[in-house]
Image (cartoon, helix red, strand yellow):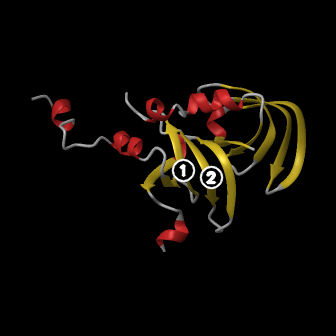
Amino acid sequence: MENGASSEGKDPSTFLGEIIGAPVTVKLNSGVVYKGELQSVDGYMNIALEKSQEYVSGQLTRSYGDAFIRGNNVLYIAAV
Amino acid sequence: MEVGEYLNMASQLLPLELIDKCVGSRIWIIMKNDKEFSGTLLGFDDYVNMVLEDVTEFDYTGAQVKLPKILLNGNNVCMLIPGGEGPAGSS
């Protein structure tokens, strides 16, 4: 199908390719925020984060060396 | 004439074609829950997952968060308003 993918070369999969290895902020539907280094991501928006920190209502609550986030919970992935 | 053909006549603009026309311009996104986003649309896919730039996130309290570049999950998207600048612009 013709869509935004073709015209600008900035569709979701190319964006994901660009930000692998970069520091990112991931927000879940629950409002919890994870900040860390994006190790990998797939078509379901399943995410593997390194050196991740968990923020609940803006407060740092926990830290994880490695974390997997199941994609259905993800609201957005932001490059920082 | 088949139904699909009828629906795709020149006068008809498919929903995703409307979004395609918005690529490169500002867009206002209203989510299923009380969340809204505004930003420049860089791209999207068939699920309406969207890549956005210079984004403002509005939550139900009215608080705003600025984000340089995001991939927004299309799962909870409810409505897209081309040219919208978020809740402040419309009221």
**What residue do we see at 68% from left, 57% from top?**
B66
Upstream in the sequence, badge 2 or badge 1? 1
Q: Residues within 10 Å of mark 2 (few under 14, many from 20)?
A: some
**What residue do we see at 56% from left, 33% from top?**
A12
Classify the position of the C terminus of chain A by image quarter: top right
Residue B46 point in image, percent of width and height: 44, 33
Write down the residue under mark 2: B54
* Figure quadrant of residue A3: top left
Toward the bottom, the furthest residue is: B91
Classify the position of the N terminus of chain A by image quarter: top left
Write down the residue under mark 1: B40
Q: Secondary structure at mark 1?
A: strand
Please report contact status of discs 2 and 1: CB closer than 8 Å, yes or no: yes
Instruction: Say what amino acid the circle numbered 1 marks.
Output: Thr
Q: Residues within 10 Å of mark 1 (few under 14, many from 20)?
A: many
**What residue do we see at 40% from left, 41% from top?**
B20
Q: Which chain hosts label 1?
A: B
